Image (cartoon, rainbow, N blue to C red):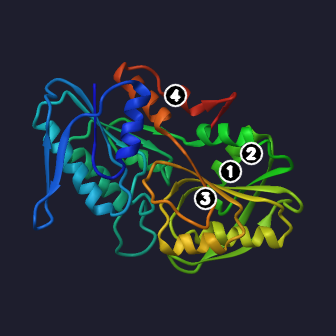
Amino acid sequence: MKIFTGTANQPLAKAICKSIGIELGRCTIKPFPDGETFVKIEENVRGEEVFIVQPTSPPTNHHLMELFIMMDALRRSSAARITAVLPFYGYARQDRKDQPRVPITAKLVANLLVASGADRILTVDLHAQQIQGFFDIPVDHLYAAPVMYDYLKKKRLTDLVVVSPDTGGLKMAHAYSQVLKSGLAIVAKRRKSPTEVESMAVIGDIEGKNVLLVDDLTETAGTITAAAALLKEKGARQIIACVSHAILNDTGIERLRKSMIDELITTDTVQRPAIDGVKITTLSVAGLLGEAIKRINSNSSVTSLFEFKGGRTS
């Protein structure tokens, strides 16, 4: 078994290798003067099971292309099986035709991954679970919830209510509320544009309670900050946001600085520079991914990684 990484999140790849006690595979990735990517695998992979760690975080197209080229290089080097490890699956929000004449880009990316040489996909917290069905190869879909739960348990929060900032995240919020033995509420929202959200109403009792807002992804932080403002207005005490993938552009960072959110808990699925003025707790999914990689390599069950304290995250 060998693990390689692109340039998208090298610290995570190194942490995964450390968690399972192997060296990170050697490869050269460099740009040509015209912007094309050159890849050379610097060690023998003939007959080996190979894993490539590469979240498709911004710049998304660059990191995707890098992944495709790496897989092609490995396939042409006679690797036995190639697993694309995508801690964050970009383009996941474009998973259906909700307007005339638009693409289903999540499906296109799935086709390109398979065409480039992927025999298997390992990913964390897909934006839409049905994306697994876009592949005709095995997909191992992990959840960051067990990592989040361990941290939340140590905080010993009382009078807790788990809140979904929209209807799409209700299933995830319900799973958190069951494990944390807390109440459940939902914010009904209306989206004005891809970057602006208008929150409308809270369904559930949150007055005087500590609130845990859960979501899979935030970029402009419009949904969670609008939800937090509404929850504070309705009498919420402390507001903690729990987001698997915090990609956070400049707009998102500025909104979080001005928001009612006391703490943002996220993971290291995507690499992020240090951010001032916002309390961000970053938990590592390296152990989770490392264990999944070991089990895939030994043809063992990955299912138990979905389960924690008697509940399931799905």
- Please identify the quadrant where the C terminus is shown: top right
Which residue ends up furthest to the bottom in the rendered image? 192
Task: Give the mark nearest the N terminus, 4 or 3.
Answer: 3
- Mark 2: which amino acid? Ser
Q: Nearer the viewer, mark 3 or mark 1?
A: 1
**Marks 1 and 2: in contact by CB < 8 Å?**
yes
Q: Is residue 251 left or right of residue 233?
A: left
Could you give the CA–CA distance between mark 4 and mark 1, rounded to whole angstroms? 20 Å
Secondary structure at badge 2 equals helix
Residue 143: % across, % down: 54, 41
The vertical placement of 224 against 190, above or below, is: above
Residue nearer the viewer, 141 or 13? 13
Task: Give the mark nearest the N terminus, 3 or 2.
Answer: 3
Secondary structure at badge 3 equals helix
Task: Give the mark nearest the N terminus, 4 or 2.
Answer: 2
Q: Nearer the viewer, mark 3 or mark 2?
A: 2
- Mark 1: which amino acid? Ala
Q: Which mark is residue 303?
A: 4
**Marks 2 and 4: in contact by CB < 8 Å?**
no
Instruction: Please give the residue where the numbered disc 2 appears in the rendered image.
Output: 177
Q: Residue 278 is drawn in which quadrant?
A: bottom right
Q: Residue 180 is drawn in which quadrant?
A: top right
Instruction: Please give the residue where the numbered disc 3 appears in the rendered image.
Output: 168
Instruction: Please give the residue where the numbered disc 1 appears in the rendered image.
Output: 173
Could you give the CA–CA distance between mark 4 and mark 2, rounded to whole angstroms? 21 Å
- Mark 3: which amino acid? Gly
